[in-house]
Image: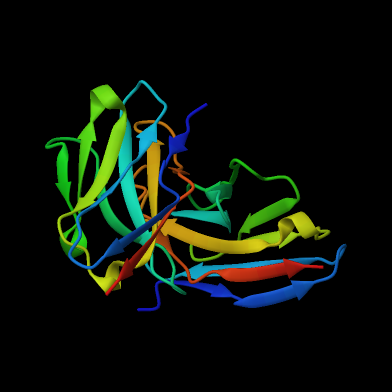
Amino acid sequence: NAGVTQTPKFQVLKTGQSMTLQCAQDMNHNSMYWYRQDPGMGLRLIYYSASEGTTDKGEVPNGYNVSRLNKREFSLRLESAAPSQTSVYFCASSPRQGTLDLHFGNGTRLTVT
Amino acid sequence: AQSVSQHNHHVILSEAASLELGCNYSYGGTVNLFWYVQYPGQHLQLLLKYFSGDPLVKGIKGFEAEFIKSKFSFNLRKPSVQWSDTAEYFCAVNLSGGYNKLIFGAGTRLAVHP
């Protein structure tokens, strides 16, 4: 049982480049989330998907887009990367809306130069 | 706006010392409360949670937390820490019955020396 799988684990981008972070869960969870973790700021919610077919903005959505491709997969796209997006990105899932018993992936460390 | 404050950013303890990490939130309504732990190089894991009932919640690895509604607090405690407790600890809050997302505190980095 893999849980929440994120790819890639590491990525270096130049300013202006685009990329998609992939996330998949095999626990049949309904809700999925993307967070970024920055030193001294904890985790901040970028976007979430309460259920398949829905997505909503979190605290810091600017510069990002998401796609809930199906129940298993929730991708995060940076259309034009900026140095301020250098961070560690975590995907998480929870069984259903409101339970918030989050299961996290191992993270993607992104550096934008 | 809803916010979570963790007052101790870095804590250094010796093994067998007692631990208390503070967490306060700013919201007057009903909340759900969580503590997550992130061991070095790993992802976040749920340590314990409070939804309702007994305000003293016991979690994994000997941790417990007490919800004090009048103080808007949910402090994490452990009577005797071990070197393996070295990690970063995050408090998180959710508005029950409505929102579908957690608000995290900035985290407390705990270092336990043998």
Q: Is residue B8 above or below residue B52?
A: below
Q: Is residue A12 above or below residue A83?
A: below
Q: Nearer the viewer, residue B94 or B70?
A: B70
Residue lying furthest left? B54
Q: Quadrant of the N terminus of chain A?
A: bottom left
At a point 65% along the width and 44% down the height, the residue shown is A60
Q: Quadrant of the C terminus of chain A?
A: bottom right
Q: Position of residue B107 (x, y in %)?
A: 45, 51
Q: Is residue A70 visible?
A: no
Q: Position of residue B79 (x, y in %)?
A: 15, 56
Residue lying furthest right? A16
Q: Nearer the viewer, residue B49 or A57?
A: B49
At a point 64% along the width and 57% down the height, the residue shown is A67
Q: Position of residue A27 (x, y in %)?
A: 37, 67
Q: Is residue A42 visible?
A: yes
Report the colour scheme: rainbow
At a point 31% along the width and 67% down the height, the residue shown is B112
Whether residue B55 sits left or right of residue A52 in the image: it is: left
Whether residue B108 sits left or right of residue A18 in the image: it is: left
Q: Position of residue A12 (x, y in %)?
A: 75, 74
Q: Write down the quadrant of residue A108 in the picture.
A: bottom right
Q: Nearer the viewer, residue A93 or A111?
A: A111
Tally the numbered discs: 0
At a point 25% along the width and 26% down the height, the residue shown is B69
